[in-house]
Image (tube, helix red, strand yellow):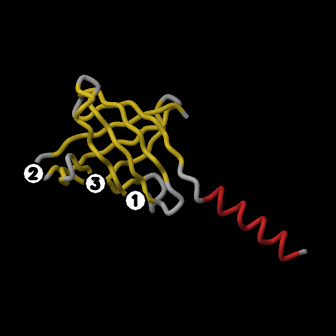
Amino acid sequence: MTKTIFLAVAFIFCGVTLKAQTQYYSGTSDGDAIEATLTWKADETVSGVYYFTPNTSRVYKLSGTNYVQGEIEVVESFNGKRTGSGTLYKTLKKGRIVWSGYLNNSSGTQSYLYLTRSR
């Protein structure tokens, strides 16, 4: 009986912790309006997409890790090609969660990514 209870609790715990959590953000990329989603996984990986609101067909993919609390090491890609990478930092501004930072683009330039959502 004890084994059964232990296994049941273990399965429930695994089911809860393995669940990914998707969050929706608005923000800017170099000042242009974007919408984004980020999915946080139990293994500390993050994936998502963002698109410029005037042109929803141009979708950028984001993938990365969240090994350090408050930091995401992120890689950006478009049409399967890596376009940039960098670190986004978490802050709180006016009661909102903000992830922001510079991405070093494969073209040698930098772009500033700013994502925000309510708490």
| Type of amino acid under label 2 | Gly
Q: CA distance from mark 1 to mark 3?
A: 9 Å
Sooner in the amino-acid sequence: mark 1 or mark 2: 1
Disc 1 versus disc 2: nearer the observer: 1
Is 108 displayed left or right of 56 in the figure? left
Foreground of the two, 52 or 1: 1
- Asked which secondary structure carries label 2, the reply is loop
Residue at the right extreme, as displayed: 1
| Type of amino acid under label 1 | Thr
Q: Is residue 51 above or below residue 11?
A: above
Give the residue drawn at x 26%, y 42%: 60
- Could you tell me residue 58's position as x and y percent? 22, 35
Give the residue drawn at x 25%, y 46%: 102
Q: Which mark is residue 108?
A: 2
Q: CA distance from mark 1 to mark 2?
A: 23 Å
Q: Is residue 84 above or below residue 49?
A: below
Tell me, yes or no, whether the two marked residues, 1 and 3, touch with CB atoms within 8 Å: no
Give the residue drawn at x 38%, y 46%: 48
| Type of amino acid under label 3 | Val
Q: Is residue 117 above or below residue 105?
A: above
- Could you tell me residue 115's position as x and y percent? 37, 36
Q: CA distance from mark 2 to mark 3?
A: 15 Å
Give the residue drawn at x 25%, y 35%: 29
- Could you tell me residue 96's position as x and y percent? 49, 32
Which quarter shows the N terminus?
Answer: bottom right
- Disc 3: which residue: 75
- Asked which secondary structure carries label 1, the reply is strand
- Asked which secondary structure carries label 3, the reply is strand
- Disc 1: which residue: 65
